[in-house]
Image (tube, helix red, strand yellow):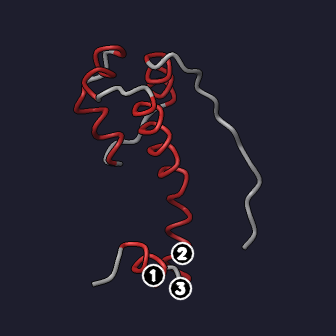
C-alpha cells in the first residue's frame, strides 16, 4: 500500500495535477496557519469559538477546508488568540 506522500509524489509528475496543486497552496497555507496558531496555544476549537464568538462548527469548516474565511473572520480569529493578522505577498518560486 502506498503512503499519501508516495501517492502525491506520483501525482505531481502530471503537469496538470501539479499546476492545480500549486494553485491551492495559498488555501492550504491559511488552513495550516489557523490550526498551528490554535494548537500552539493548546486551544480546542470550542475554546477558540468562545473567545471569538465564531461558531465552533464554522471553525471546523475553516480548518478542514470546506469554508473560505474572510479577512474580517481571520482578524477575529487572530484577536481571539492574542495575535495580529499579517498578510504578506512574496515572489513566486521558480522550479
- Tell me the residue at 28%/38% (across/down): 60
Q: Check disc 1: other Cα within 10 Å, few if <14, some if 14-19, many if 20+.
A: some
Residue under label 2: 18
* Element assignment for label 1: helix
Q: Name the residue under label 1.
A: 11
**Residue 59 image point, x, y percent:** 31, 32
Marks 3/1 in contact by CB < 8 Å: the verdict is yes
Q: How crowded is mark 2: few (under 14 residues within 10 Å), some or many (20 or more)?
A: some
Q: In x, y percent, where is residue 16?
A: 52, 80
Percent x, y for residue 26?
55, 51
Neighbours of disc 3 within 10 Å: few (<14), some (14-19), many (20+): few
Using the image, determine if residue 65 lies above or below residue 9. Answer: above
Check disc 2 and report its element: helix, strand or loop: helix
Tag 2–tag 1 contact (CB < 8 Å) = yes
Gap in angstroms between the C-alphas marked 3 and 1:
5 Å
Please determine whether, in this image, residue 31 is positioned above or below residue 17.
above
How far apart marks 2 and 3 lie (CA) works out to 7 Å
Mark 3 and mark 2 in contact (Cβ < 8 Å)?
A: yes
As helix, strand or loop, the secondary structure at mark 3 comes to loop
- Residue located beneath label 3 in the image: 13
* Image: 95 above or below 75: below
Q: From the viewer's perspective, is residue 6 above or below residue 79? A: below
- Is 34 left, or right, of 61 in this rendering? right
Mark 2 vs 3, N-terminal side: 3
Amino acid at each position: 500500500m502506498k503512503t499519501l506522500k508516495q501517492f502525491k509524489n506520483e501525482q505531481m509528475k502530471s503537469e496538470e495535477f501539479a499546476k492545480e496543486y500549486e494553485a491551492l497552496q495559498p488555501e492550504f497555507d491559511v488552513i495550516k496557519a489557523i490550526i498551528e496558531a490554535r494548537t500552539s496555544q493548546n486551544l480546542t476549537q470550542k475554546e477558540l469559538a468562545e473567545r471569538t464568538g465564531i461558531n465552533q462548527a464554522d471553525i471546523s469548516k475553516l480548518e478542514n477546508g470546506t469554508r473560505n474565511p474572510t479577512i474580517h473572520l481571520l482578524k477575529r480569529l487572530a484577536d481571539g488568540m492574542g495575535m495580529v493578522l499579517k498578510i504578506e505577498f512574496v515572489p513566486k518560486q521558480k522550479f
